[in-house]
Amino acid sequence: MANFDLVMPKMGESVAEATIIKWTKNVGDKIKIDETVLEIATDKVDSVIPSPFEGVLLKRLFNEGDVVQVGAVIAVIGNEAGAAAPEAPKAAPVAETKVAAPVAAVPAATTESNNYGSSDKFYSPLVKSIAKEEGISLTELDSIKGTGQDGRVTKADIMAYLPTRGKQSAPAVAETAAAPAAAPKVESKPTSVSAGEFAVIVNRPAVAVGAGDEIVEMDRMRKMIAENMVMSKHVAPHVTSYVEADVTNLVMWRDKAKKEFEKRDGEKLTFTPLFIEAVAKAIKDFPLINVSVDQTQTKIIKHKNINIGMAAALPSGNLIVPVIKNADEKNLLGITKAVNDLANRARANKLVPDEIQGGTFTLTNVGSFGNLMGTPIILQPQVAILAVGSIKKKPAVIETPQGDMIGVRQFMYLSLSYDHRVVDGSLGGSFLRRVADYLEQWDLNRTV
């Protein structure tokens, strides 16, 4: 049986490399088809690489923590005989070599800016792209203090550095020694947060650690979520508006249609596709909700496509937002298929980076946790996010030709958080009301 090369797969149009987080197989281990060999991470999503071959892991060409280019060979899989008689060593892939030839005779500003891979530090593709666009050399990039995991430079770090670039005469002074171990505490440290052209310095408060307290290290995804949420609150002045909607007809129609829908199309009909359909219609009525603000904070980008992200809770407790592209062009069945597929693969950690990028508006269903309403944080660079609460029965005044009467109706709250730089109360409130109108005016006689 011949040996097979396991390569770093293409994970999206904008993804050129990934970091190896963990090898789940050691050299000599048997591997079945579709069995996970290693776990990887990009700027956007964590994923796994399964084996398309059955055999034995003969070689691992990279270590945990290495950054590997898409298309590079990362492992060799063969039969047990191949494992017993190792092949002659192959030349290491270019991506694995991290020691560059001396360049002392060439000015750093003209060579290092495009040679970030030779650094001993890890830089994400996004950070390297920003550095290249801004003409930041490798030496200068290495001097930026990072606030990410293991001191890594994040997007927020490099964006906060740009306004002060050239104004610093020397690298930041090293931090002073920590306090005696007898009184452990998490020290307050300043964090730079990018806000377009502006950089905000946030002093994080010190936290005393008491006897019996447990310190839990955030996983990689939780750190990314925390960083993005803090950045969003500093970038965009948030305003939240609320409406209460009578969705009795919607509930009655779904109760009547869901069995037929599943029997005919093989898909479970939840409320989420119904909400997304209403949001897509309302965005077409109010297209200025479907925009972004550029980094200069002087230009508004009006998006042609309506790509609606749906926040999904993962078994780990983290959150991910897969995106339904061109939601306005899909019928209810198409939206339902997309919602169910993305939700199932999100929980199984099988999303690819392209499926969580390109969103222009986000929906989060806080009602799935039994909450009446929420004040969600905008997912940058979008300008609005809608939270839908749980549906509850309530007594209500019903107007009829014969007069008013009291009846039991199904109500829910909808809350819209929006970026007050470009979305005023009139636009935000009108859009939110239109979403509620589409839900309230649901046709009971609509065919499945």
Image (cartoon, rainbow, N blue to C red):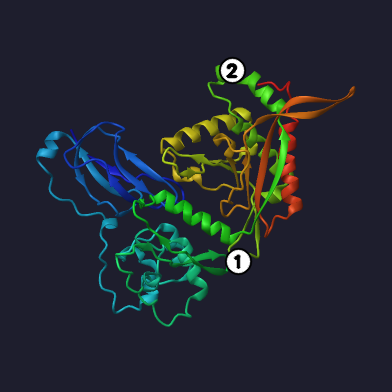
The amino acid pointed to by label 1 is: Thr
Element at label 2: helix
Left or right: 435 with respect to 350? right
For marks 2 and 1 on the same chain, the one whose residue lies earlier in the sequence: 2
Q: Position of residue 228 (x, y in %)?
A: 50, 55
Residue with the most extreme bottom position: 169
Up-down relation of residue 39 to residue 151 (above or below): above
Residue with the most extreme left position: 85
Residue with the most extreme right position: 402
The amino acid pointed to by label 2 is: Lys
Q: Which residue is at a point 65% across and 38% down the rendered structure image?
A: 328
Q: Residues within 10 Å of mark 2 (few under 14, many from 20)?
A: some
- Residue under numbered circle 2: 259
Instruction: Count every numbered label the image shows and give the total.
Output: 2
Left or right: 239 with respect to 226? right
The residue nearer to you, when weighing 55 against 268, is: 268
- Residue under numbered circle 1: 296
Q: Are marks 2 and 1 in contact (CB under 8 Å)?
A: no
Up-down relation of residue 151 to residue 347 (above or below): below
Q: Position of residue 277 (x, y in %)?
A: 65, 35
Up-down relation of residue 379 to residue 298 (above or below): above
Q: Which residue is at a point 67% across and 40% down the rendered structure image?
A: 414
- Residue 284 visible somewhere in the drawing: no
